[in-house]
């Protein structure tokens, strides 16, 4: 069943095109409407505010956990444990889901924070709004533009490597005659640039998350 889904048109549309942009846009619209609906009807709801706060806390925790796991554990563990092309196949599946999850969670955190702090903003709060908005924008760009290019270039790279009998190594690549192949070197150079861009975006998101956690730490008092 899982294999059938991975080969379906729906999965290809989600992972290989810009269609996720429409899904993310629809999600944003629905969440905004959900957040402001009590005000539209002319009444507030304390239970709703509590529910929104729970969503915010869960999103912050899940987002930061995903960042830490993928950045410092999952990728490195798989890279040094699996054959190169097997590792690539794992990342080919995980990358779109990871970046999409982060983008959606960033949007939820951004909107929830604005909603929760509405009417009580100070300079520190406004700084956090900028940080969260910048992070959400960065992660949306990485998901919609960098991730698809990484997958495409990775597919080309691996097809060329298979021809030369490379790709079964663990933790390194034996280029063999690929070092003399202009096509491979050009694709590899583009891949490194796009991958570096995605990595910078990921580290930027991590930095923004740390700043937001520091902000939250100043608001918590345990005594």
Image (cartoon, rainbow, N blue to C red):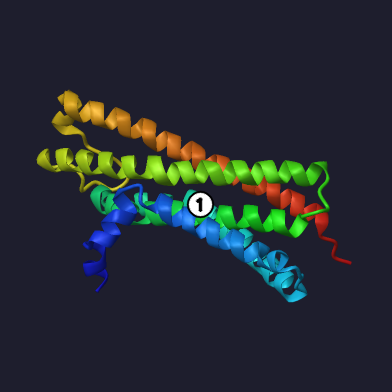
Give the residue drawn at x 23%, y 60%. 9
Residue nearest the viewer, comparing 170 with 111: 111
Give the residue drawn at x 61%, y 66%. 34
Task: Estimate the x, y position of residue 209 in percent, counting from the top left.
Answer: 63, 48
Task: Decide if residue 90 is in sight here.
Answer: no
Label 1 secondary element = helix
Name the residue furthest left.
163
Residue nearest the viewer, comparing 6 with 113: 113
Task: Estimate the x, y position of residue 133 in percent, counting from the top left.
Answer: 62, 44
Would you say 98 lies left or right of 191 here?
right
Would you say 156 lies left or right of 23 here?
left
Give the residue drawn at x 54%, y 62%. 30
The quarter of the image holding the N terminus is bottom left
The quarter of the image holding the C terminus is bottom right
State the image quarter where residue 207 is shown.
top right
Number of numbered markers: 1
Task: Estimate the x, y position of residue 99 in percent, counting from the top left.
Answer: 45, 51
State the image quarter where residue 128 is shown.
top right
Task: Identify the residue under disc 1.
Answer: 103
């Amino acid at each position: 069943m899982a294999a059938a889904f991975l080969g379906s048109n729906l999965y290809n549309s989600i992972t290989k095109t810009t269609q996720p942009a429409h899904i993310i846009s629809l999600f944003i619209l629905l969440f905004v409407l959900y957040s402001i609906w009590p005000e539209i009807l002319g009444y507030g709801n304390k239970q709703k505010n509590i529910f929104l706060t729970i969503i915010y806390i869960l999103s912050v925790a899940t987002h930061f956990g995903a960042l830490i796991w993928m950045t410092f554990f999952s990728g490195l563990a798989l890279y040094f444990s699996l054959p190169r092309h097997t590792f690539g196949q794992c990342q080919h599946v995980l990358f779109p889901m990871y970046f999409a999850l982060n983008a959606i969670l960033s949007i939820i955190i951004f909107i929830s924070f604005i909603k929760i702090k509405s009417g009580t903003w100070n300079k520190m709060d406004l700084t956090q709004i900028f940080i969260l908005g910048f992070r959400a924008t960065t992660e949306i760009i990485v998901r919609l533009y960098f991730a698809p290019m990484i997958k495409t270039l990775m597919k080309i790279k691996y097809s060329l490597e298979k021809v030369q009998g490379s790709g079964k190594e663990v933790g390194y690549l034996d280029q063999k005659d690929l070092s003399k192949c202009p096509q491979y070197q050009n694709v590899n150079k583009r891949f490194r640039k796009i991958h570096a861009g995605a990595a910078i975006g990921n580290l930027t998101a991590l930095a923004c998350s740390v700043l937001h956690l520091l902000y939250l730490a100043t608001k918590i008092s345990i005594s």
